[in-house]
Image (cartoon, coloured by chain):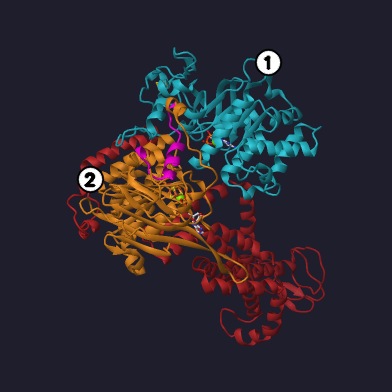
Chain colours: A orange, B cyan, C red
Amino acid sequence: MAQEITTPATTGTTLVDVKGLKVHFPIKGGIFNRTVANVKAVDGVDMFIQRGETLGLVGESGCGKSTTGRAILQLVKPTEGSVVFEGDELTKLSPGALRQKRARMQMVFQDPFGSLDPRFSVGELVAEPLKNFNRGNAKEIEEQVADLLRVVGLNPFFMNRFAHEFSGGQRQRIGIARALALRPSLVVADEPVSALDVSIQAQVLNLLQDLQGKFGLTYLFVAHNLSVVKHISDRVAVMYLGRVVELSKSVEMYEMPLHPYTQALLSAIPVPDPEIESKRKRIILEGDVPSPVNPPSGCNFHPRCWKAQAVCREVIPPLEEKQYNHYAACHFPG
Amino acid sequence: MAENLLEVNNLKTYFFTRSGVVKAVDDVSFVIKPSQTLGIVGESGCGKSVTALSIMRLIATPPGKIVGGEINFNGENILEKNLDELTDLRGSQISMIFQDPMTSLNPVFTVGYQIAETVKRHHKDMSNDQAWKRSVEMLDLVRIPDAKKRAKSYPHEFSGGMRQRVMIAIALACNPKLLVADEPTTALDVTIQAQVLEPMSGLSKEFGTAVMLITHDLGVVAGTCQHVNVMYAGHVVESAPVKQIFATPAHPYTVGLLRSIPRMDEKHGSSLTPIGGQPPDLSREIIGCPYAPRCPKVQNRCRQERPELKPVGRGEQVAACFYPD
Amino acid sequence: MDTKDKNQEITGHEYMPPDSVVSPLQLDPDLTVLAENDLATALSENELKELAEKKEKPATPLQDSLRRLRRDKRAMASVGVIGFLVLLAIFGPFIYQHIGGPYDSALNGTISPQVYHSYYHQELDRQDEGPSAQYWLGTDDLGRDLLARLMQGLLISISIAVLVEVVDITLGILIGVLAGFHGGWIDQVLARFTDIIFAFPGLLFIILVAGIFGAWADTHLSGIPIIGANGNARLLLVSLALAFVAWPLMARYVRGQTLQLKEQQFIEAARTAGTSDTRIILRHIVPNLFSIVVVAATLARCL
Ligand SMILES: Nc1ncnc2c1ncn2[C@@H]1O[C@H](COP(=O)(O)OP(=O)(O)OP(=O)(O)O)[C@@H](O)[C@H]1O
Ligand SMILES: Nc1ncnc2c1ncn2[C@@H]1O[C@H](COP(=O)(O)OP(=O)(O)OP(=O)(O)O)[C@@H](O)[C@H]1O
Ligand code: SF4
Ligand code: SF4
Ligand SMILES: [Mg+2]
Ligand SMILES: [Mg+2]
């Protein structure tokens, strides 16, 4: 499906190339604990991430954003498909080789409370990846930890304190310091600011942007808040029910969405400006996101799509380049 | 009938905890007019929910206690009512919807039954059939497709957005004069949020219900509210008609809040101006303006006296700041 | 596509040279400056000062709970009682046997307190007595010192409890964690085994073991120096039988908690940081089992 996605040869290099990625979680049931059905959390995702860019991944709750991010990092085993990172096919690496590769790809987690072990001090938390990869003796590691804490705007003085003594925003900084410790090239940020207050959100977003420049990072930025994604991303991929339905430069996506779902999604976002709000017309989608256990046939958006035709029920629309560097998976885009 | 449906005067709700007295709501005053939608915004922990719960008299005591002020609903002080009067008031005159639509419905009864129950609690003379009819009608109003059939479904057969709409149906079933909605869409996705907000503002117009909408999403405020209270550290720091809040914010905190959110309509590559620091710990004594440690315009005076809400010379707009914009 | 300048030097599939990966962070000077400025935003001046004044080392979660325990008067009282009983059991008999003068027994001649204050010595003419200067708590119906017997009983109870607890916790954690973390056949075996144990009356099992193997243990194990004679071998046997019926429950608690912990984000975060499974178990899972193990260890005694 959609094999025609290739990196445009003229521009930057591809850091991550995802093709036909599927992650199905079995639902066990019955007396013999057999697989009775599959949650098709990710069901054929194609995308690529270019070195140095920020690719935003948006979509509604349960559409498989986190699972895609985790499958790229091989934190869940993909059922099918390939993930090429820095030239290596990750799905075929041995566990040992994969562990080595982890130094190059890191993750920032959504939950600033659950993602830090409550029994570790801040210093230990940030040192953990460094120790795992033997990056120096105890003293060198401590120096690196101090540097990292400074980089994310925390005082190294707090190295001996525990995560529970910090606020959400500060904890998220600790998580970022940890992710940066090994100097990765790819950072998957799974809703890094969703749990934070608006005023703190901006602090963390700015920090992430600063660090990207300084460390030459590539981000896969997962979020459900489209305003945040638009702010931070160079390109945006929109997911619906386990598939990428649209992929383009973020400015283009917001100005001229091609996929009906993207159009509805964009129109639903409240804008903090009463003038604009009073004039805006909302596309209110009927119904809810269908269950990923039993996704609709053909284009899985068809039960909610106002443009749906007979063909949409039967043929899965491939993710194609509809306009220059603007991909959409729809039979009737525009 | 009074001109103001709800008048909150100098409300103080404190929590007496082991680590000190948490002044969750400290000297808060505001009014809601009939059929007005008032938005309350502010950071987590600034006292939005406690304000709402105080109006409902649902503060858990201990550790909480309303230690001062008055809440006049239709000219009567809610704080002086006894339990029976309160029960009467809740649901029929004032009703509330909570953030979590999953836990607010009883999983073992059909949604139709749950709406009918509420109706019958306040209209004792109503027959079962009438009540059931009313619940189907309400489900229809909140745009549940095929309401007649869906009334017989159980909550778990509904999605989050539908459940929240059922909650709205329950809340509005007795035609209350005031609907208190505490972050009704925070747990929902944007497309579902639109499905919930649309009937809510539509119905409040239709029935003349006043709404107190608590949220931290300024976009939602812009789209649904007529008047906005901005809260910070247990105080209302600014109160103004929605247009003025966004066009000419007066309090530095409101200004900071507006500058720190990414906007859909912004130019690409523009950078955010975050508010530095963090909200204060409410269990400690705050001297002077609570926003002073984070305020870019802070002066010596701000650290010594607490500013009161004062008009800033633009109609109804008031702000608690010595040096408003 | 707007590729940023900073990546221009990288072409094709050539990636960041490995040594820049291993070398410690080279920080831009101006980056650190940024951080210093940013610091002010992360924590206000006052908070910094305040924290700096608190010179004391921050408390670990364990120290934290210990501190809370110390403040709880009832808990401290209980700790005091338990401590007293343990001391009594260990040192009590020794001290007691040195208290009191020689006693002219009608049946046994003149005997020292070492004899009449031992838990097995009988003075058949002094049955069922009340407390006296010689027998502080009186005697039983066979004329034995009640206080001495009480202390001995205490020692036995405590040593059984400790022994059972040690075996129970070790086995329970080991098997529970493995079953919870890896699932698969260990989990299946554990599940079946606990089912069997739960279906089988534990007390009956212990009585059976003591009855069937007791004599055998007496003859075969009492030769081992630390165990010695005096029925200690039987005690050991009973303790082991107790532990044997107790650990599956512990393992189940631990397994459940491990399953929950495994889903926590910090475990996934550790994995992303390249932490091996063994280290994840030892450093992240086992320490976080502490609370459930404490609770389960006290509950399991209800047998
Ligand atoms: N370990 C798992 N076992 C079974 N189903 C799972 C598992 N993890 C995720 N799922 C299911 O896969 C689907 C996609 O989940 P995922 O967490 O990727 O969504 P998401 O887009 O990140 O949503 P959110 O915005 O709520 O985080 C959901 O329906 C979820 O229930
Ligand atoms: N039961 C309680 N005991 C002690 N303190 C409480 C209690 N309930 C609330 N508080 C405190 O009151 C303050 C205000 O809480 P409130 O729930 O009103 O915040 P909020 O503005 O609704 O925040 P959020 O956006 O997170 O819902 C908080 O600092 C909170 O810690
Ligand atoms: S393929 Fe058809 S159903 Fe799917 S989005 Fe396009 S028009 Fe709608
Ligand atoms: S009173 Fe002073 S510190 Fe408070 S918001 Fe106004 S200018 Fe800032
Ligand atoms: Mg997610
Ligand atoms: Mg709240």
The residues colored magenta run A254-273
Q: Of helix, strand and loop, which one carries label 2? A: loop
How many marks on residues?
Answer: 2
C-alpha gap between disc 1 and disc 2: 65 Å
Q: Chain of mark 2?
A: C
Residue B137's place in the image compared with B231, above or below, is below
How dense is the environment of label 1, judged by Cα within 10 Å: few (below 14), some, or many (20 and up)? Answer: few
Q: Quick check: is the Cβ at mark 2 less than 8 Å away from ligand 5? A: no
Residue B35's place in the image compared with A61, above or below, is above
Residue B80, quarter of picture: top right
Residue under the image location 64 percent in, 43 percent down = B146
Instruction: Determine if residue A157 is in view.
Output: yes
Q: Of helix, strand and loop, which one carries label 1? A: loop
Q: Residue B145 location, x and y as percent?
A: 61, 42
Residue located beneath label 2 in the image: C4
Q: Position of B100 compared to A14: left or right?
A: right
Q: Residue C276 location, x and y as percent?
A: 39, 65
Q: Is residue A265 within the magenta segment?
A: yes
Residue C184: mark: none
Q: Position of A53 compared to B211: left or right?
A: left
Residue under the image location 71 percent in, 70 percent down = C149
Residue under the image location 56 percent in, 20 percent down = B30
Front position in the image: C23 or B164: B164
Residue located beneath label 1 in the image: B1
Q: Quick check: is the Cβ at mark 1 less than 8 Å away from ligand 2? A: no
Instruction: Determine if residue B210 is in view.
Output: no
